[in-house]
Image (cartoon, helix red, strand yellow):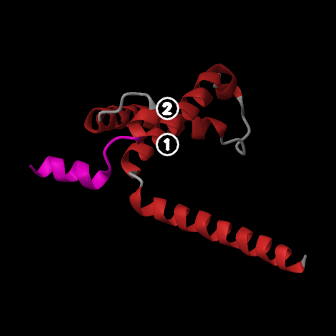
């Protein structure tokens, strides 16, 4: 019985090692450009949600110097045009369809770079 328990532990350890190696391999083989676009797009949408809830008339009336919400919101809305323009450029350059699953299955980065050199 002890042998079976030892084998189960060894199998579990090996499965953990394989999972770790797969994660490490993905760092080298996954295309960060398309994934990066979707991460940046998610961040932009989160910022837009914050700004959508922002009430300028309420915030401008506050007198507390400790409340930096207005300053942070201002930084968001001032940076928003550049962020959106950058996302649009990436979308065109990377031929993003908006379907993340399909976009992530596109040609690997190395092959895409080789295509652009031809």
**Looking at the picture, does residue 91 appear above or below residue 39?**
above
Residue at the far right in the pictured view:
1
- Residue 4 left/right relative to 74: right
Residue 1 percent location from the top left of the image: 90, 76
Per the rendering, the mark at residue 13 is none
Residue at the far left in the pictured view:
118
Residue 9 percent location from the top left of the image: 78, 73
Q: Residue at x 52, y 36 (%)?
A: 42
Q: Residue at x 72, y 34 (%)?
A: 63
Q: Residue under circle 1?
A: 39
- Per the picture, the main secondary structure of the magenta-coloured stretch is helix
Q: Is residue 111 magenta?
A: yes
| For marks 2 and 1 on the same chain, the one whose residue lies earlier in the sequence | 1
Task: Decide which of 71, 42 is in the foreground and name it.
Answer: 42
Q: CA distance from mark 2 to mark 1?
A: 19 Å
Q: Residue at x 24, y 48 (%)?
A: 112
Task: Decide which of 46, 52 is in the foreground and name it.
Answer: 46
Q: Is residue 101 magenta?
A: no
Residue 11 percent location from the top left of the image: 71, 70
Q: Residue at x 43, y 46 (%)?
A: 36
Other-residue count near label 2 (Cα within 10 Å), few / some / many at <14 / 14–19 / ≥20 = some
Other-residue count near label 1 (Cα within 10 Å), few / some / many at <14 / 14–19 / ≥20 = few
**Looking at the picture, does residue 32 appear above or below residue 65?**
below
Residue range of the region highlighted in magenta in the rendering: 105-118
Residue 46 percent location from the top left of the image: 58, 34
Which quadrant holds residue 66?
top right
**SS under mark 2:** helix
**SS under mark 1:** helix
Per the rendering, the mark at residue 77 is 2
Task: Check if mark 2's residue and mark 1's residue have beta carbons within 8 Å.
Answer: no
Which of the two discs, 2 and 1, sits closer to the camera?
1
């Amino acid at each position: 019985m002890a042998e079976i328990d030892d084998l189960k532990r060894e199998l579990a350890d090996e499965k953990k090692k394989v999972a770790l190696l797969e994660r490490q391999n993905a760092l080298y083989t996954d295309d960060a450009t398309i994934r990066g676009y979707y991460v940046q797009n998610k961040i932009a949408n989160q910022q837009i949600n914050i700004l959508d809830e922002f009430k300028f008339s309420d915030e401008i009336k506050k007198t507390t110097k400790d409340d930096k919400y207005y300053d942070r919101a201002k930084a968001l809305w001032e940076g928003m045009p550049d962020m959106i323009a950058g996302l649009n450029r990436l979308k065109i350059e990377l031929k993003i369809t908006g379907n993340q699953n399909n976009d992530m299955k596109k040609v690997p980065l190395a092959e895409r770079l080789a295509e652009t050199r031809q």
